[in-house]
Amino acid sequence: MDPVVSISHLSKGYRRGGQFVPVLADITLDVAAGEFTALMGPSGSGKSTLLNLIAGIDKPDSGELRVAGLDITALSEAELADWRAGHIGFIFQFYNLMPVLTAFENVELPLMLTRLSRAERRERVALVLDMVKLTDRAAHYPSELSGGQQQRVAIARAVVADPVLIVADEPTGDLDRVSAADILGLLARLNEKLGTTVLMVTHDAHAANTARRLIHLEKGELLDSGAGSQDSVQRREGAGSGFAESRIPNPES
Amino acid sequence: MHALKLAIRNALRHKLRTTLTVVGLIVAVLAFGLLQTVVDAWYAGARAASNGRLVTRNAISLVFPLPVSYEARIRGVEGVNAVVRSNWFGGVYQDPKKFFAQFAVSDNYFDLYPEFVLTEAERRDWLRDRKGCLVGRQLAERYGFKVGDVLPLRGTIFPGTWEFVVRGIFEGADDTKITMHFLFHWDYLNESLRKAGRGRADQVGMYIIGVANPDNAATVARAVDATFKNSLAETLTETEQAFQLGFIAMSNEIIAAIRIVSYVVILIILAVMANTMSMSARERIAEHATLKTLGFGPGYIVLLILGESCVICAIGGGLGIAATPPTAAAFKQFTGGIFPIFTVSGATLAMQAACAVAVGVIAAIVPAVQAARVRIVEGLRAIG
């Protein structure tokens, strides 16, 4: 099976105060379809930069980067925006929900860029809100939800358009242990039941253990990669119960 | 549609800030409308002037009169169908602050001014009474003049106390006509001056000429002036509107100042609005970055900020426009009839609306372009 993410000799740096600061150096990496991968490393190791490049919100200086078979480095800003809308689901550390929109409307946002009718959008949003167990909170604004609930809304928003890849940047970084476990369990279930590829950046070893594969970055270089802990695999296996079995249809299909 | 919904909700997000900005907009749009109406009021007389009437006066200055003998010669000019003698009286009623225009006019005045309506009975009464006078409806209402009242005026140009009996109150044919003046018999003035024997009789301040065909007004004016070329009192003949505008020109600086102030008010609110939108855009950098991350383009971000700005301006501008006519009516009442015609014109309302839209659009341009240009990665860093 072709990898969802295929990176070859990727480099990225920034100019700060007239000096070039390398962030990623000669990264080569494949992420297979359906994988739940955790990208770990200390602050400044370049893990968020790598995630941003894979998600198409930043551009590399050199190297190849293909996502779902497409060389996204060749896309213009407008093409990238369209591509992100159709292929990537985003989960942020601070949820990044629109405070003036309800949970329902926030989840509906990515679908506004599709050709779905209002009824189809509503049906799909209701489905994913049910998946994240927030049906009863659909009409609530983010300020009326707890951190864990807000992150679940963000997850619903990330999956609603049935993306090829979900990128999560420190999704539990702003949550307490209980809420963090809840969110990680939810991501694991999404990965397992829907088969969505998940790429998660974290510096929390406990969170990383939820993933099947660990990738370590240090000072912009890929150190090693390996499997997640056996505990996490067992935890995932027990987390599937009660999860919506239905696959989210792709809005473009 | 979705952008508009989001823009409306964003506009109402900071209620205090939006309320204060809306109040500022209401005041600015209202002030702009009132100042424009003041300028309009200044021109009301000139606008009401007929292009079928000419005014002939002494070429040197309006201060110098013309001989009464000119009337017959003016009547003889081709294209002239009526001539009215008119002298500015300049009397004081009770107090100099109670100023109103007073003219001594020949009896055929109303033949030339069909826009002023007088009943046949009142006209007859006025013609029968040498000391009779006529007052306009607006003037009568301002000072409470009634038919039969005796009005004493203290002459300034023509010394002495002059007594007049109100014989009629004339109306304007429509709301745009100013009826703030006072008319009496030119013959009464002339006979009194003749009796006084100071050599000021048989002189006319200006002749108002009725032109048979308004299209020929310029030709008739030139013919009248040519008639008195090289005489002791050469004439200057111009349309009534040009004559009125000549008076207004004396206040050109004041009118220009009022106009400038009205636009400065709009510029100030533009700066306030631009500041509000800059603050809003800066606060929402991360939200805009999130929207871009989800696939919304820079155009959508521009639309959001532009929409929010226009929503605030529509509320403020709409309320300001709605408040202008009643405020103008109250202003007219408060100023005691300084401006007999003080009506907010459709053009003024349209200008107010245009200003509100312009403020909404211009204030949003820079913040919108800046927000659209922010890189997603930089925008997302604005969180936390």
Image (spheres, coloured by chain):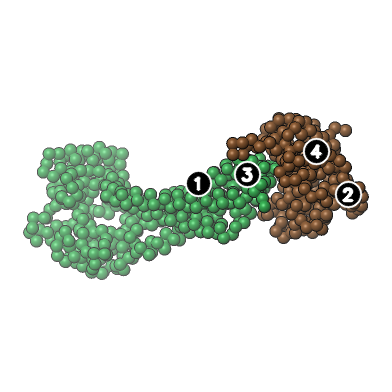
Chain colours: A brown, B green
Dot 3: element: helix
Total number of numbered discs in the rendering: 4
- The answer to whether residue B329 is visible is yes
Image quarter hosting the N terminus of chain A: top right
User: As shown in the figure, which amino acid type bears the numbered disc 3?
Assistant: Ile
The chain ID associated with circle 2 is A
Give the number of the mark in front: 4 or 2: 4
What is the C-alpha distance between the residues marked 4 and 2? 22 Å
Residue at 73% x, 38% y: name it: A220
Q: Mark 1 points at which residue?
A: B358
Both marks 1 and 4 on one chain: no
Q: Is B260 left or right of B186, judged from the image as shown? A: right
Give neighbour class at mark 2: few <14, some 14-19, many 20+ (Cα, 10 Å).
Answer: some
Which is more toward the observer, B11 or B258? Answer: B11
Q: Which of marks 1 and 4 is in front?
A: 4
Quickly name the residue at label 3: B301
In this figure, which residue is indicated by the disc labeled 4? A223
Q: Residue at x 76, y 41 (%)?
A: A218
- C-beta proximity under 8 Å, tags 1 and 2: no
Q: Same subunit under labels 3 and 4? A: no
Q: Do the residues at discs 3 and 1 belong to one chain?
A: yes
Specify whether residue B129 is in view.
no
C-alpha distance separating marks 3 and 4: 40 Å
Front: mark 3 or 1: 3
Q: Which amino acid does label 4 sit on?
A: Leu
- Judged by depth in the image, the label closer to the viewer, 1 or 2, is 2
Q: Mark 3 lies on which chain?
A: B
Q: Which mark is residue A232?
A: 2
